[in-house]
Image: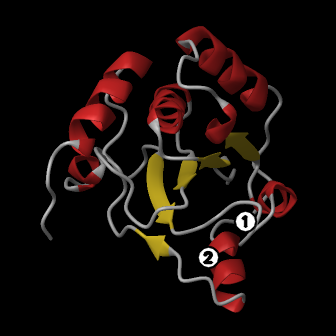
Amino acid sequence: MSRSLSIAVIGAGASGLYIADQLMCRTVGAHIDLIDQTPAPIGIAAYSARPPRSVAASTTHLIGNVRVGTDVSAAELRGVYDVVIDATTFAEGVSEFTLDATIDIALAGAEATHPRLELAELLQRRGVPATRWVNPLNLPTGRGLREWQAALATSRGVPVCF
């Protein structure tokens, strides 16, 4: 039985959400962790309310309150995941073409070699109070980069009560 691809996307801003969304469209059975420095990034709660479409489909989970470079290094992430894409390196005006090319390059020749869930164990050993959302994000949505940017901009203006 072959293992599924394990992918980390760093940053839950518009670029990170677009990349995770596109990965869901392009990969079958992949496990994607969206890693962000905030415990609950703005604008994505609505995408965790429903269960995933099918058990065999790819899944995207959010791991929050993790600062890459402080709590865990990029090199350590590359040791845990088959593919690591840092979405925080892209400026706000980045094009979908650039992000799509980044995804294509990252997936080229990628093989499923790393076991899952090592990041949670690593963070727990270091005492990092990471948040892992229980439900997978309900992706793909088919949204373009501008739609993700608009959704996050709208969310910043909405009061949230839990």
Q: Is residue 61 left or right of residue 151?
A: right
54 or 77: nearer the eye? 77
Q: Is residue 96 visible?
A: yes
The image quadrant of residue 96 is: top right
Q: Which mark is residue 160?
A: none
Q: Amino acid at mark 2?
A: Ala
Mark 1 or 2, which is nearer the eye? 2
| Secondary structure under the numbered disc 2 in the rendered image | helix
| Secondary structure under the numbered disc 1 in the rendered image | loop
Q: Which residue is mark 2?
A: 120
The residue located at (67%, 71%) in the rendering is: 119
Q: Position of residue 13 (x, y in %)?
A: 47, 40
Q: Is residue 126 left or right of residue 13?
A: right
* Colour option used: secondary structure
Rate crowding at label 1 as few (under 14), some (14 to 19) or many (20 or more) other CA atoms within 10 Å: few
Q: Position of residue 53 (x, y in %)?
A: 28, 44
Vertical side of 152 occupied by 63: above or below: below
Q: Is residue 154 left or right of residue 142?
A: left
Q: Position of residue 145 (x, y in %)?
A: 43, 20
Image quadrant containing the N terminus: bottom right
Q: Which residue is mark 1?
A: 115
Q: Earlier in the sequence, mark 1 or mark 2?
A: 1
Q: Is residue 144 visible?
A: no
Image quadrant containing the C terminus: bottom left
Vertical side of 94 occupied by 12: above or below: below
The residue located at (51%, 64%) in the rendering is: 63
145 or 54: nearer the eye? 145
Q: Amino acid at mark 1?
A: Pro
Q: Position of residue 47 (x, y in %)?
A: 27, 47
The image quadrant of residue 116 is: bottom right
